[in-house]
């Protein structure tokens, strides 16, 4: 019996786990998820993601973010690069600056997964 | 203007970010969240969380988990300890074994946060 079948077919107390189980039954899906979680495993990056999400128009450049987090531009750029590589932010070059926006699909997918795991 | 007020008061395109912004506007909340994400930033721990969640009765001991992930008991115990310390699993000692269960509150909170950030 697969892990997903176990989740659906047996008594579960007050936790139902369709989301997480369905997605991470195989090691490859777990790798993809872990990569996104690892990128968020740093308080500065959590704050940067929220600052980008909250910024006017839903996007921000590095120049908008250095002051709120109190870090040098090179450090902020490094953190933003990690968030882009994990698929949590997108980056669009316009003239001198790159503009970052939250990647809604990625966040919603992880969120649904966790919510369904603890519904 | 606070980050949360920015999120509520301005045009956001198709991303609304009340959840993430409300929770991580301050560095302390970001630290708590990052700790949970960091614990999940490892594919083995993502799989262990899903295996515990999927296990009959919603709880599992180390002895149930070593074979599915193909790792030694000491390694699995180490990963489980990290998940407990991050508040993602609970551990109850019964006789010889500790029994692990998903902490529904923690998962649901993070899940809501991300879902609201990309609704």
Image (cartoon, coloured by chain):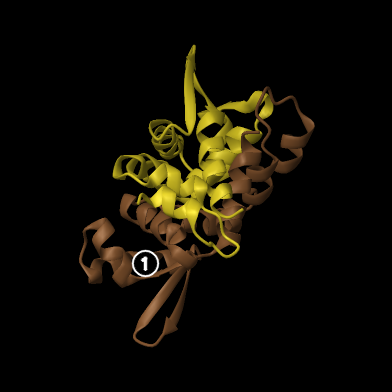
Chain colours: A brown, B yellow
Q: Residue at x 58, y 48 (%)?
A: B115
B69 relative to A84 in the view: left or right: right
* Closer to the camera in the image, B114 or A52: A52
Instruction: Classify residue A82 by image quadrant.
Output: bottom left
In the image, is residue B15 above or below residue A3?
Answer: below
Residue B51 coordinates in the image, percent (x, y): 60, 38
* Closer to the camera in the image, A63 or B1: B1
A16 relative to B3 in the view: left or right: right
Residue B57 coordinates in the image, percent (x, y): 67, 23
Q: Which residue is mark 1?
A: A80
In the image as oriented, which residue stretches furthest toward the top? Answer: B95
Q: Residues within 10 Å of mark 1 (few under 14, many from 20)?
A: many
Q: Is residue A77 visible?
A: no
Q: Residue at x 49, y 59 (%)?
A: B10
* Closer to the camera in the image, B10 or B71: B10
A111 relative to B71 in the view: left or right: right
In the image, is residue B71 above or below residue A104?
Answer: above
Residue A86 coordinates in the image, percent (x, y): 47, 64
Q: Is residue B110 visible?
A: yes
* Closer to the camera in the image, A15 or A99: A99
The subunit carrying tag 1 is: A
Residue B45 coordinates in the image, percent (x, y): 48, 44
Q: SS at mark 1?
A: helix
Number of numbered callouts drawn: 1
In the image as oriented, which residue stretches furthest toward the bottom? Answer: A95
Instruction: Classify residue B33 by image quadrant.
Output: top left
Instruction: Classify residue A12 by image quadrant.
Output: top right
């Amino acid at each position: 019996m697969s892990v997903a079948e176990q989740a659906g077919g047996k008594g579960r107390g007050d936790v139902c786990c369709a989301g997480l189980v369905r997605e991470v039954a195989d090691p490859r899906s777990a790798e993809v998820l872990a990569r996104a979680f690892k990128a968020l495993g740093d308080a500065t990056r959590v704050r940067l993601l929220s600052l980008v999400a909250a910024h006017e128009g839903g996007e921000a450049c590095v120049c908008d973010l250095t002051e709120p987090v109190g870090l040098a531009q090179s450090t902020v750029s490094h953190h933003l690069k990690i968030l882009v590589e994990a698929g949590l932010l997108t980056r669009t070059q316009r003239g001198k600056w790159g503009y970052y926006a939250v990647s809604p699909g990625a966040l919603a997918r992880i969120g649904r997964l966790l919510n369904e795991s603890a519904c």
